[in-house]
């Protein structure tokens, strides 16, 4: 039987499109402050081949400042409502119970939390109560502190251990195993080599028995590897990393360039 996540079958690598509605995200901040533009872009991404649309209202760029729940909700709720009306699998990228609750009520299907349900103690019980699928991400430190730089003994094993522990805590709280996905959190306090190792180690993360989500798109480690300073200029390399992550075992890739990623994944499947 083919596994699925939030109603999306995982018979092939799936694409999660990024729709940031923030003024300060590292790559596309300020582009979608108008909800109509964000909804239009989300619909276009689905037309281009996205299986899930991830809506976020708080930047995680190193050095960014947190926003309060009211402001975050003001940014994301109209977009979630607009996309959900089209029966799209919408993910809400949030750390806050109030935001998640309102967005689930509005039709979001997935909670995607960069803190792995740690920042807001009430969020795990809400996810369990609603039966919502959840993405648990590994993060070292916080955005406003420009993240920590831990000394990993083995980055793949250390991140895997953390994520499995969080997944098991979720299961104890009543979140079903099949509703949990793991994201190693590329960037977020990892060196260039550690990010590369995590992509290469996607199969090791996946063998824990949960779908793995890899979000490498336009990140600074790609800039350091390629010498491309402008995040938008990193799309070709980002597509390659997404394909490599899928080849190594990622079930979902989170991207900005949906059309390019869809084409590259289709060719990769044919080649295999």
Image (tube, rainbow, N blue to C red):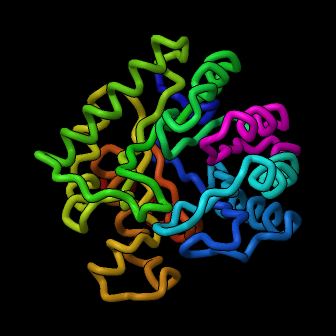
- The part of the chain drawn in magenta is 84-107
Residue at (53% x, 29% y) in the render: 4
How many labels, in total? 0
Residue at (82% x, 54% y) in the render: 79
Q: In this view, does 148 lie above or below 8?
A: below
Q: Which of 236 and 22 is in front in this view?
A: 22
Could you say which quadrant of the image residue 234 lies in? bottom left
Q: Is residue 95 above or below residue 29?
A: above
- Furthest residue in direction front, as rendered: 145
Residue at (38% x, 59% y) in the render: 147
Q: Is residue 135 above or below residue 82?
A: above
Residue 138 in the image: x percent, y percent?
38, 44
Residue 181 in the image: x percent, y percent?
46, 34
Q: Is residue 165 above or below residue 28?
A: above
- Residue 50 magenta: no
Residue 184 visible: yes
Residue at (82% x, 43% y) in the render: 84
Residue 271 visible: no
Residue 99 in the image: x percent, y percent?
74, 41
Q: Give left or right: position of 182 versus 38.
A: left
- Furthest residue in direction left, as rendered: 153
Q: Give left or right: position of 140 versus 50.
A: left
Residue 120 in the image: x percent, y percent?
58, 34
């Amino acid at each position: 039987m083919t596994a699925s996540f939030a109603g999306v079958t995982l018979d092939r690598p799936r694409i999660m499109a990024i729709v940031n509605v923030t003024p300060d995200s590292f790559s596309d901040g300020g582009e979608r402050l108008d909800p109509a533009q964000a909804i239009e872009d989300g619909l276009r991404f689905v037309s281009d081949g996205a299986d899930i649309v991830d809506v976020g209202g708080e930047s995680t760029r190193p050095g960014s400042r947190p926003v309060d729940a009211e402001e975050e909700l003001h940014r994301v709720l109209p977009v979630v409502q607009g996309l959900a009306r089209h029966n799209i699998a919408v993910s809400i990228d949030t750390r806050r119970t109030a935001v998640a609750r309102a967005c689930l009520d509005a039709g979001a299907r997935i909670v995607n939390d960069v803190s792995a349900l740690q920042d807001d103690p009430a969020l795990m019980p809400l996810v369990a109560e609603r039966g919502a699928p959840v993405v648990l991400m590994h993060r070292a430190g916080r955005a406003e502190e420009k993240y920590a730089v831990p000394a990993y003994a083995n980055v793949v094993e250390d991140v895997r251990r953390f994520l499995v522990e969080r997944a098991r805590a979720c299961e104890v709280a009543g979140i079903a195993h099949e509703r949990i996905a793991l994201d190693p959190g590329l960037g977020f306090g990892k060196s260039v080599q550690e990010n590369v190792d995590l992509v290469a180690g996607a199969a090791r993360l996946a063998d824990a028995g949960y779908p793995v989500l890899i979000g490498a798109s336009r990140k600074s480690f790609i800039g350091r590897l390629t010498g491309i300073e402008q995040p938008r200029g990193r799309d070709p390399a980002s597509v390659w990393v997404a394909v490599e992550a899928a080849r190594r075992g990622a079930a979902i890739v989170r991207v900005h360039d949906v059309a390019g990623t869809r084409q590259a994944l289709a060719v990769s499947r044919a080649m295999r």
